[in-house]
Image (cartoon, helix red, strand yellow):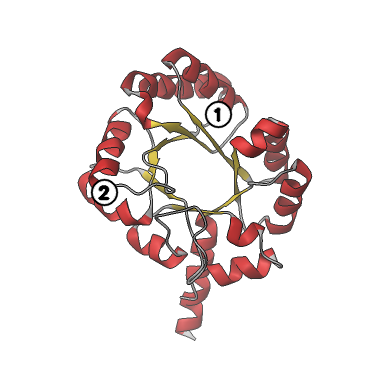
Amino acid sequence: MKDEGRRTKDETDAAERVILALDTDTCRVAERFVDLLYPKIKIFKVGIHLFTGYGPGIVDFINKKGAEVFLDLKFFDIPNTVAQAVRQAVRLKVKMLTLHIMGDEEMLKAAKEAAVSEASRLGQKAPLLIGVTVLTSKETTSSDVLTLAKIGIDCGLDGVVCSAREVGLLKKEIKGNFVAVTPGIRPPRSAVNDQKRTATVKEALGAGSDFLVIGRPILEANDPLVALGEILPAG
């Protein structure tokens, strides 16, 4: 009975950390996945694919459902432009959003100041600012990811995007608390598609990842609910 109790807790804990990437062609399909999978999945990623086609409406739909939004637009521009974009994201009441750390320190600090000041003005919690290090579709070295992650955290970001391969090093070498968001999550023995640095849920959690982004293994499954159950660790 103890093993079963632990398994239930482990599965629940893992499910709380899963972010479903709504990389769909239409808003209607995205909404269908939210309707189907919430509240088993409580955070949904809206990226450039969906946001370009349908705008803030999908963010509003997710919020009204009771779920939370990871706005993954990877802001990268001059400091003032990024700061204004972050202010708009705060008004959308997203849980977290992404910026490219390569945008430089001035841009990152401007984004942080904008998030904090706008959230204070509105009387709400500021979103987590998550810095993109190196995309998981690219091969890289852990030292490159560490260098970028340090820059981002030093500039006030709340976390970074990194593969499970680098999480342990980052948690060891960077002082203070920060969030590690890991994309490229795949079931054991599944196709990696265009991702290079993939991991299973169990591997990513074991490495220290805080949030796990999953897309195609669930979106392309015949039964997304069954697929989610198969992806989560059995304890």
Residue at (60%, 65%) from the top-left corner?
Answer: 228
State the mark number for residue 142: 2
Q: Secondary structure at mark 2?
A: helix
First in sequence: mark 2 or mark 1? 1
Residue at (75%, 47%) from the top-left corner?
Answer: 31
Residue 207 percent location from the top left of the image: 33, 60
The residue furthest top is 80
Q: From what the image shows, is residue 206 above or below residue 182? A: below
- The amino acid marked with disc number 2 is Ser
Residue 194 percent location from the top left of the image: 50, 53
Q: From what the image shows, is residue 26 above or below residue 13? A: above
Q: From what the image shows, is residue 128 above or below residue 203? A: above
Residue at (36%, 21%) from the top-left corner?
Answer: 109
Question: Image check: 179 left or right of 57?
Answer: left
Q: Secondary structure at mark 1?
A: loop
Mark 2–mark 1 contact, CB under 8 Å?
Answer: no
The residue furthest left is 173
State the mark number for residue 151: none
Within 10 Å of disc 2 (Cα), the crowding (few <14, some 14-19, many 20+) is some
Residue at (71%, 67%) from the top-left corner?
Answer: 222
Label 2, label 1: how far apart the Cα atoms are: 36 Å
Question: Image check: 29 left or right of 139?
Answer: right
Residue 59 percent location from the top left of the image: 67, 36
Which residue in the structure is indicated by mark 1?
124
Please say whether residue 176 is visible from this viewpoint.
no
Number of marks in picture:
2
- Residue 135 quadrant: top left
- Residue 200 quadrant: bottom left
Please say whether residue 178 is visible from this viewpoint.
yes
- The amino acid marked with disc number 1 is Gln
